[in-house]
Image (cartoon, grey):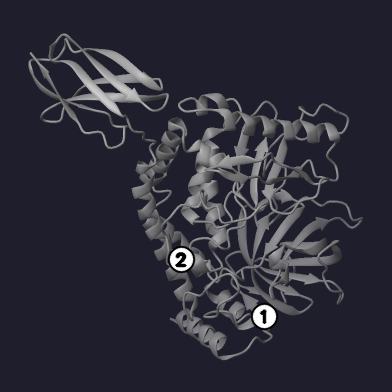
Amino acid sequence: MLRFFLYIFFILTSILLPAQEVDLNSSDIPILVVTTGGLEIPNEPKLDAHLGIIDNGLFRNDITDPFNGYDGKIGIEIRGNGTADLDKVSYLFETRKSDGSNNNVSILGLPKENDWVLYAPWIDKSLIRNVLTYDLANRIGMYSSRTRFVELVIDDEYKGVFVLMEKIKRDKNRVAVTKFEEDNNDPSAGGYIVRIDSWFHHTKGWESDIYQVNGEDRACYFQYVYPKYDDITDNQKEYISEIVHDFERTLDTATPPDIAVEISDKIDLKSFADYFILQELSKNPDAYRLSTYFSKDVDGKIKMGPMWDHNYCYGNYNPYQNVWEKWEYDNHWFDFPGQIPFWWDKLLKDSTYVSTLNDRWNMFRNNGTIDCNMLSMRIDSWAAEVYEAQGRNFVRWPVLGENSTFNWNAGPTYEDEVDYLKNWLCNRIDWLDEQFPKMKRKFEISKFEISPNPATLYTTISIQSPVTDKTRLHIFTLDGKLVITEHLDLVKGYNVKELDISTLSKGVYIINFPEIEDFTSKKLVVH
């Protein structure tokens, strides 16, 4: 009951009071204390500073408690592109030894490393969207950053609720591609991490070729993540860019039904399916075109992920408020260089990829990974974790019930934001349940004949097909029992196939093509 009244107090004060300083005395989540000596933290380069972490586990954290989670040197800078101009900004920091070298440490139970992100939820008033997406990605087997909620104080100034996250980088506990050894000049001896994003400089990446999607030019920018653009050699640049070019050229020229066959040695199809599912589940307006990561390990295939930057997702974007319908992969209202690559439109023309999508979606639905009740409980759990701290956050930053440039608001209380997120997500799941089965690629046939009909032992079907493709023919009894399945390899034009019906008893049967759109079932008489 006390927590409830605290919650109401914090909400009311965040509505009635302007932005104000908050004195943080204690918290039920870890406290991070950064000391810069009064210096302003720049966008770059990193500023030398001190970080102390108070983390008493199940016990309360007092601001006067000793630093027991970390107590040492860091370098810190502001991070982000557009978000760097918000009132509440995010930070990058690296843990350092006294001599300034990297200090690989475990922070708040996360695996040892030296590069970290302090993400500042501002646009996302639920505070949860990134945490939800990364957690879900890890649960389906795609590494994405692990997270912890914290409260941040910089030079005695309370900054609010932040999310400690792992920076995307090559590491055995992060993106685990093979490390390049300094004395090995073979560009195939290590792994690569690449990002698709909108900003470009020729030393930091390369530009794709131009491809067509329904008569529209599509191109994008690729950026070196590992090896870093400051470290990558010319041979490595040529090697990874040619691998991506080869994939794109092959995908562009492949035709149904052989698209997946043509690219099977180039991409990890499952990772492409999982990435698609997560981006569409969240209805991310930046999906596929910004903050889009993929990797390529030694002797491996192009693999999508990790997920990154999901603060606008789950209906948290002004054109999408309360709209949980429509796909994102065919969203083409962005200009170059922020366009969605042609990959997804082309892959969805392939029955193997679409079947993989359906199989993965059905598996996640059946095992409870993507489930309205389960995800709602997880959201409630995170909301409870920051229940007390969000009150202070929205006193310091009174944005509840206020519109910002790119989003809207779900209501004047934090509870409104959490309820909206859960309801929107459940509606999106329901919509996708209806849509994924419809994505099974269909095509029309212009002519279909059975001769002879009635028939005995054998009959012949004639099909006029507008495309070269594979399909199936089903023969059912009148009471719906499937008795024959024939797999057909159709060529564009006229096709003739003899059917062995010698196993059928005398009677009337129904012929059906499950993958051919608008096909009217025909009767076959056996005598």
Question: Mark 1 vs mark 2: which is more N-terminal?
Answer: 1
Q: Say left or right for 464 vs 522.
A: right
Q: Residues within 10 Å of mark 2 (few under 14, many from 20)?
A: many
Q: Is residue 487 left or right of residue 98?
A: left
Residue 296 position (above or below residue 472) = below
Image x and y of residue 474, in percent: 24, 25
For the C terminus, the image quarter is: top left
Question: Could you tell me residue 490's position as x and y percent?
Answer: 38, 21
Dot 2 corresponds to which residue?
Answer: 421
State the quadrant of the N terminus: bottom left
In the image, residue 508 sits, relative to residue 272, either above or below, namely above
Q: Residue sitting at 55 percent across and 77 percent down?
A: 403
The amino acid pointed to by label 2 is: Leu
Give the number of marks: 2
Q: Is residue 380 left or right of 32 when viewed as pictured?
A: left
Q: In the image, residue 447 lies at what x, y percent?
A: 28, 26
Q: Amino acid at mark 1?
A: Leu
Q: Which mark is residue 24?
A: 1
